Amino acid sequence: MSKARCVVWIDPAQVSLLKGIIERGNFELIGAGSPDSARIGQVASSLDTQPIDDLRHAFASADADLFILGDPGSFGNQASDPDLEGLKAAHGRNVEIATFEPIPATASEIAGTLYAESLQNGSLNELVRLAPLTRHTPTIVELLTVLETFGPIRSCNIAIGVPSNMGSLGARLFDAMDLIRSLVGVPNMIEAAYISPAAGRGLHPLPGQSLRDLHGEITTNLRFSDGRCASMLLSDQIGSSNLSMTLIGAEGLIQVDNHGFKWQDSKGNEIDSYQYESTPEIDQTEIHIAEQLIELCSGVGPKRSPIDYQTILSMTHSTLLSTRTGQGESPRSVEQIMLSM
């Protein structure tokens, strides 16, 4: 079986990570570029491949099976029609595109663009895939099966963190909102706080309208219309990937970590458990990225529910808005504004 031919578009700080992903996925690297045009040669040389200096042109012409956008730069930041046409050009040639960062990265100015239609009809899922997606990791796939017996989650806490070269805080926020939607549903109110790595005495920068270039930590409290609740702590500033979840319901407690999960009833008796076989010396997020890219290129993976981009974007941008207003914000209200502006 021939190797999938791959092009990467990354920040120089991601070179080592991409080497590991390419090796683990058994991809053939045929080109590399960077949103920092002055460092394209450095990136290509470090990966011992040909330089790529125009991403949109490469989408339409490169003899590749897969593009990995470790750092898309300005591409897909706004809901730009030319960017979406670039994705469609690649898709029309049966080229897969995976990105570490959400595309589009902002909910503003979507109405009236080609993105509006792709969000509403779900076609964006066929054009670009976010990786890693926590919902598609082995532990969460197994957990979702167990939850059919566990029943509704009454309350939960989720903590997700990765090193900064594996995606921004905005990517973690998008990923976490996709996960919470699958576990609990869509909240009717989100209250959030943000802290930047650059924060200090008298200095406390706040997020703008884009998920791109967002770094640091975000905490959220989420309230649901039926009274259930959830909280999150997200970071892109830790040394190695970490997942920690506590789920509480009528059937007891489920605790999730990097290694699997354990379900205990209200008296502390173990009902079920799952152990994920991992490689300790390799960061789990690197493993999950490679696994999801292998599945994407093979085209024979299990059928998974797609990302509800329209809803997830409204949830992420309600969070960003709350960090600025200091008040709870409604995803449904943001969604209505997003598509009517």
Image (cartoon, rainbow, N blue to C red):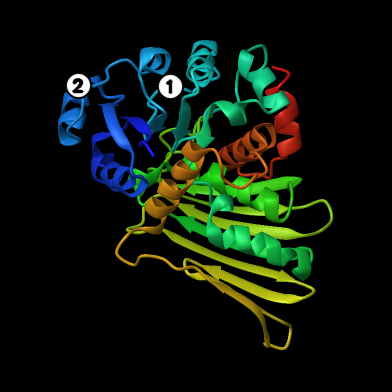
Q: Secondary structure at mark 1?
A: loop
Name the residue beneath numbered marker 2: 38
Residue at (39, 28) in percent of width and height? 72
Quadrant location of the N terminus in the rendered image: top left
In the rendered image, residue 338, in percent from the top left (x then y), is placed at 68, 24
Please state which amino acid type lies under the numbered disc 2.
Ala
In the rendered image, residue 70, in percent from the top left (x then y), is placed at 37, 35
- Identify which residue, 303 or 102, lies in the foreground: 303
Task: Write down the quadrant of residue 317 in the picture.
Answer: top right
Name the residue beneath numbered marker 1: 75
Crowd band around label 2 with a 10 angstrom C-alpha radius: few (<14), some (14–19), many (20+): few
Quadrant location of the C terminus in the rendered image: top right
In the rendered image, residue 184, in percent from the top left (x then y), is placed at 73, 55
Please state which amino acid type lies under the numbered disc 1.
Phe
In the rendered image, residue 280, in percent from the top left (x then y), is placed at 34, 67
Looking at the image, tell me whether mark 2 or mark 1 is earlier in sequence order: 2
Observer able to see residue 139: yes
Task: Write down the quadrant of residue 79 in the picture.
Answer: top right
Crowd band around label 1 with a 10 angstrom C-alpha radius: few (<14), some (14–19), many (20+): many
Q: For this view, does 242 lie left or right of residue 313?
A: left
Residue at (50, 20) in percent of width and height? 87
Q: Secondary structure at mark 2?
A: helix
- Identify which residue, 246 or 69, lies in the foreground: 69
Q: For this view, does 196 lie left or right of residue 332?
A: left
In the displayed structure, 329 sits above or below 231; it is above
In the displayed structure, 17 sits above or below 269; it is above
In the displayed structure, 289 sits above or below 151; it is above
Residue at (46, 25) in percent of width and height? 95
- Mark 2 near mark 1, Cβ–Cβ under 8 Å? no
Observer able to see residue 110: no
